[in-house]
Amino acid sequence: MILNDKLILGLSTDIPNENRRVKNIKKVITLIKDAEKSKCYLTKKLISALINAGGVDFDMYNTLLQQKFKENRSELTQRGTFKNQIKTSRYNNLKVDNLLELYPKNTNFRVIDVMTTIEYHNKIIALINLPIVFGNKELLEIRSMLDMDYWELFEIVKYSFNEGMKVKENIFKIISLFESSEQRTLIMESNTIKTTTDVLRYIYFVTDNDYTELPSKDIMEYPIKFKLRTSTKKDIMLLLSNISINEDDVLKYKKQWFRVQYNLSPYSEKFSKFSTELFDILKKNPKKTFSQKSENYKKKNKMKKLIKHLSKKPGELLRSLDYIIRNSKKKDIQVLKEHIEEINFSTKLLMQVRKWVEYRSSNSLETRTFKPKGKVFSTNEKPLDKLGSKGDVIEIALRNKLREYLKDAEDIFKDEI
């Protein structure tokens, strides 16, 4: 195949002898002249590969290149820029013994190069694992490869899934490019589904719902219908039986899971061999989520427990620093400082929060209020007090943490640390 003006060489065991190579060179000279008539230029790397190709391979490559020449002529004709006025070819003097020496190094023609099958595979794997959420551009590039060799791309995608995807949001975007039977194979026979949220996203996908965002609000605000076939239900139950069930993840989307349960009927006899652990969680009294626990500690003013709890999610701890410092005693501040020293934070967020704590240490803050339209409203809320010496202690701890992260770039970030 030819991809992005590069002929992809197959893995061949047909090694040509010297007679075959001489015949190939004669055919390559003809191919070069055909390329010139089509305003194309074959690189020396491609010519060398053609010379050393086996007989069957050469004929296949020749056919592919002739198709490419025809496409280029057609494209140039449509643009009104193709005029075949070449009367005397610059390659008429090329001979078998000096083909590569006389062949020019540069041209303004369309350049056609070569890549090996391994290079082609690595290109696809690198594209699939780009550390970005795919847009139309990336999907179109993958689709162009799909049109050229469906099954080869399928095996490469399956391999990439088993190795682990860098951006999980891309999994179903890539799967959607294949037929339904291959979609099922990629889900059930690769290492893509690892959490209950992954399974839920798969359910959204197979029922033609938007799987890119899973709303954790009341499902009744989102009239979703999970119409599931029996075969799909069995796949879902099998996936849920093969992963570790995290209760917090389940409860985060409990409304969706209740809707899934209604359509899935997990306790029916036909699913008796599968685990129902997720649905057992739904039956029990719901365990408080991470946010609910945080709010409970705040209400009871248990700052040490709140600090320990928020330390599980460093970003949440940093975002709550203002509240914690304002409501903490000196002993609590010391506990907070110790946790900051032990936890790994996002450098960007750490910079932002340090600046905020530095500002708040010496500045009070007006509280924000919301006034409903058309209603009498008044508030006597006072500005939040400045953080003072307690804020200074935490600001120094944050600054020291930044120094630790940016020790190799102190000159660049000297204003931050």
Image (cartoon, rainbow, N blue to C red):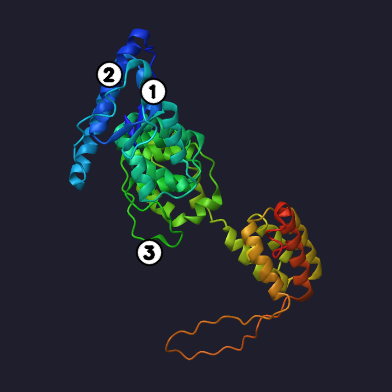
Mark 2, other Cα within 10 Å: few <14 / some 14–19 / many ≥20? some
Q: Is residue 69 above or below residue 249?
A: above
Secondary structure beneath label 1: helix
Q: Mark 2 vs mark 1: which is more N-terminal?
A: 2
Count every numbered label the image shows and give the total. Answer: 3
- Which residue in the protein does label 2 denote? 27
| Residue 189 showing in the rendered view | no
Image quadrant in which you'd find residue 383: bottom right
Spot occupied by residue 257 in the image (x, y as percentages of width and height): 43, 52
Image quadrant containing the C terminus: bottom right
Spot occupied by residue 410 in the image (x, y as percentages of width and height): 72, 57
Spatial distance from mark 2 to mark 1, Cα to Cα? 14 Å
Q: Nearer the viewer, mark 3 or mark 1?
A: 1
Q: Mark 2 vs mark 3: which is more N-terminal?
A: 2
Q: Mark 3 vs mark 1: which is more N-terminal?
A: 1
In the image, what residue type sits under mark 2? Lys
Spot occupied by residue 105 in the image (x, y as percentages of width and height): 39, 32
Secondary structure beneath label 3: helix
Which mark identifies residue 221? 3
Spatial distance from mark 3 to mark 1, Cα to Cα? 69 Å
Spot occupied by residue 111 in the image (x, y as percentages of width and height): 34, 36
